[in-house]
Amino acid sequence: MAALKACSALVTGANRGLGLEMVKQLLEARCSKIFAACRDPDGTNSEALRELAKNHPGVVTLVKLDVADPCSIKASAEKVGSLLDKNGLNLIINNAAVLPSKSMLTATVEDMVHTFNTNVIGPLFVIREYLPYLRAAAKASGKPGMSWDKAAVINISSDAGSMSIMPSLSEPFPFFPYSISKAGLNMLTVYTAKDLKADEILCISIHPGWVKTDMGGDKAPIDTRQSVEGMLRVIGSLTEKQHGGFMDYTGETLPW
Ligand code: NAP
């Protein structure tokens, strides 16, 4: 990926798994301002992220953000806004998500509501609250067309949210609320792409592959480094042609 000295980015769920690796690789790509958001920046789950922020002062800023709480999203946007200049925010990685292990027959109302709040409503309100900064970035860039270092929203989705792929899986996938929420996130991508087209703000859904994390488990075939390298390669190559699309970390287009 090209060096991104002028790029500013927000990553949600940045304290572990793919979010933490995303922060590390954005740093390697020399992104100049990285807002690493997590729900408990002072907690034991965020030690690695605190270390990164300590070693990269002025580049990595920890931001408290619980995506399941609209007030927390609003407060985080106010904080980030106060640290941005007229060049705004170039990139949002909507990464935070939950995966309750429930089937169609066992999922409770709470499972459904919590999963939807985190995986769909959270990304929606992140986009909405941060939209003025994305618009500022798109305007300040002066570049024609769409690209991730101009202004972009990347929704980390899953092939489990594909209505075409799910029925053909050979193994059972007992994560009913999650699948439905990722299908909802994909529809959010389609709406966002349509609504933000005039602002030249790019939006896609991306499947990171099956990855070794707390969520993906040990049997996953790839690690966070491979997944994020792939996603950043794909994200770095995006133009308006992929706007509103659904891809995986190798660059393959996925069916909805
Ligand atoms: P993970 O290791 O379980 O990490 C999930 C992250 O989301 C954690 O940082 C967690 O923070 C955060 N999070 C959960 N609820 C939150 C909330 N309410 N507010 C803010 N942060 C919250 O998962 P991962 O594997 O890195 O997954 C990252 C993304 O990739 C997700 O969107 C997931 O659906 C997608 N994905 C992963 C795989 C895979 O195989 N791993 C496959 C397909 C898609 P806490 O530490 O506070 O809990």
Image (cartoon, rainbow, N blue to C red):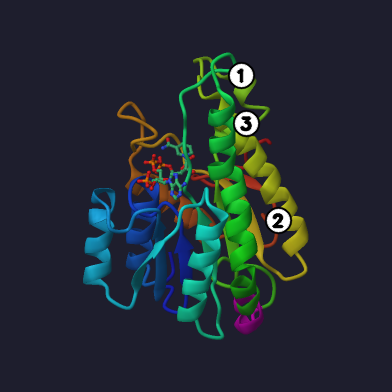
Query: Is 105 located above or below residue 93 in the figure?
Result: above
Q: Position of residue 40 (x, y in %)?
A: 34, 54
Q: Quadrant of the C terminus?
A: top right
Q: Are marks 1 and 3 in contact (CB under 8 Å)?
A: no
Q: Which residues are magenta?
A: 137-143
Q: Are marks 1 and 2 in contact (CB under 8 Å)?
A: no
Q: Residue at x 60, y 44 (%)?
A: 120
Q: Secondary structure at mark 1?
A: helix
In front: label 1 or label 3: 3
Q: Residue at x 33, y 48 (%)?
A: 16
Q: Position of residue 35 (x, y in %)?
A: 42, 67
Q: Is residue 163 left or right of residue 159?
A: right
Residue 206 visible in rendering: yes
Q: Residue at x 65, y 62 (%)?
A: 128
Q: Secondary structure at mark 2?
A: helix
Residue placed most toward the observer, 166 or 184: 184
Q: How packed is label 3: few (under 14 Cα within 10 Å), some, or many (20 or more)?
A: many
Q: Which residue is mark 2?
A: 192
Q: CA distance from mark 1 to mark 3?
A: 16 Å
Residue 142: say if magenta: yes
Q: Tell me where residue 212 sits by quadrant.
A: top left
Residue placed most toward the observer, 231 or 213: 213
Magenta stretch: dominant SS? helix
Q: Amino acid at mark 3?
A: Ile
Ligand 1: quadrant of the figure: top left
Q: Which residue is mark 3?
A: 180
Q: Which residue is mark 1?
A: 168
Q: Amino acid at mark 1?
A: Ser
